[in-house]
Amino acid sequence: QVQLVESGGGLVQAGGSLRLSCAASGRTFSQYAVAWFRQAPGKEREFVAAVSRSGGSTNYADDVKARFTISRDNAKNAVYLQINNLKPENTAVYYCAAGGAGAWIRRESRAYAYWGQGTQVTVSS
């Protein structure tokens, strides 16, 4: 199993940047693909980005690929989501999730077995 804890959220103005972090416990973290999802108020949880076990392959939702970058550092048991040029519509709770080796190509939440508690991102206009 793996436990996930997100951090780095906060209140930022539109146009600003944030770097979200997902810290994982467990020595087998490198065996998991990891994704970021988000859930805005009144909306369903949606896929944002995913990264393969090695970090060499990534998958992005179409509306974020120009401004979001997912990366991981297996030596630190961490995954990051760099968000640039934030927009008010990016306001949401952002969750990281871990799944099996092939999960990174999938965008359904059911592909990921382990979830963090989320970190709130609020973007003011």
Image (cartoon, rainbow, N blue to C red):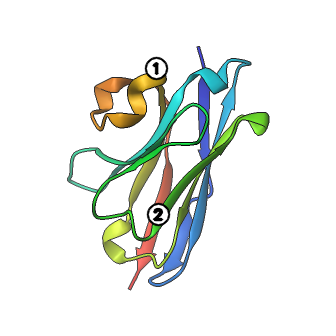
Instruction: Using the rendered image of the protein, determine whether residue 113 is visible from the camera's viewpoint.
Output: no
Decide: few, some or many residues near mark 1? Use Cα within 10 Å; few <14, some 14-19, many ≥20: some
Q: Vertically, is 33 above or below 78?
A: above
- Residue 1, horizontal then vertical, whole percent: 58, 13
The residue drawn where x is 46% and y is 20% is 100
**Dividing the image into 4 quarters, which one contains the C terminus?**
bottom left
- Camera-side residue of 36 and 59: 59
Whole-percent x and y of residue 29?
65, 24
Residue 115 to residue 85: above or below: above
Which residue sits at x=71%, y=20%?
26
Q: Looking at the picture, how far across and down is residue 12, in whole percent? A: 53, 76
Frontmost residue, 3 versus 27: 27
Nearer the N terminus, badge 2 or badge 1? 2
| In the image, farthest residue toward the top | 1
Image coordinates for residue 52, horizontal then vertical, percent: 51, 35
Which amino acid, by three-letter code, is at mark 1? Answer: Gly
- Identify the disc placed on residue 68: 2
Name the residue that disc number 1 marks: 100
Image quadrant assignment for residue 76: top right
Mark 1: which secondary structure?
loop
**In this view of the protein, can residue 112 be seen by the observer?**
yes
